[in-house]
Image (cartoon, rainbow, N blue to C red):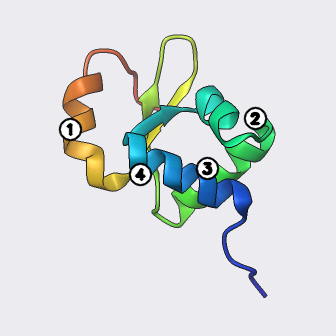
Amino acid sequence: MSRGPGRVMVALLETLEQDCSGISGELAARVGSSSESTRRALRKLRASGRVALLGVQADGARVWFVPSAARFLALLYRDRLRQP
């Protein structure tokens, strides 16, 4: 039986909805969780379609976003990211 989204998931969604996008490491710091917990929560949110992966920066950092911001962010990051 599922208990619903946890604290990290809720905090990530709130942060991404406010800022439209975020980098994995920065998101972990903003929501006050470990990088492993953040990655796990982002994977679950991605599987449910609530967040999406925009791409990967040159240093390997993943850029996440809420689907409602896709068109704007695709133009903003077009030349700076590679596809995952």
Mark 1 lies on residue: 72
**Is 45 left, or right, of 77 in this rendering?**
right
Q: Amino acid at mark 3?
A: Leu
Nearest to N terminus: mark 3 or mark 4: 4
Identify the secondary structure beneath mark 4: helix
Q: Amino acid at mark 1?
A: Phe
Instruction: Measure the C-alpha gap from mark 4 to mark 1.
Output: 14 Å
Q: Position of residue 63 (x, y in %)?
A: 47, 32
Q: Mark 2 or 4, which is nearer the eye?
A: 4
Q: Residue at position x 24%, y 25% from top?
A: 76
Nearest to N terminus: mark 3 or mark 2: 2
Instruction: Measure the C-alpha gap from mark 3 to mark 4.
Output: 14 Å
Nearest to N terminus: mark 2 or mark 4: 4
Nearest to N terminus: mark 1 or mark 3: 3
Mark 2 lies on residue: 35
Res 5 quadrant in image? bottom right
Q: Position of residue 27 (x, y in %)?
A: 60, 35
Instruction: Measure the C-alpha gap from mark 3 to mark 2.
Output: 10 Å
Q: Quadrant of the N terminus?
A: bottom right
Please tell me how crowded label 1 is: few (under 14), some (14-19), or many (20+) other residues with Cα within 10 Å: few
Whether residue 43 appears in this view of the structure is no
Mark 4 lies on residue: 17
**Depicted 39 relative to depicted 55: above or below:** below
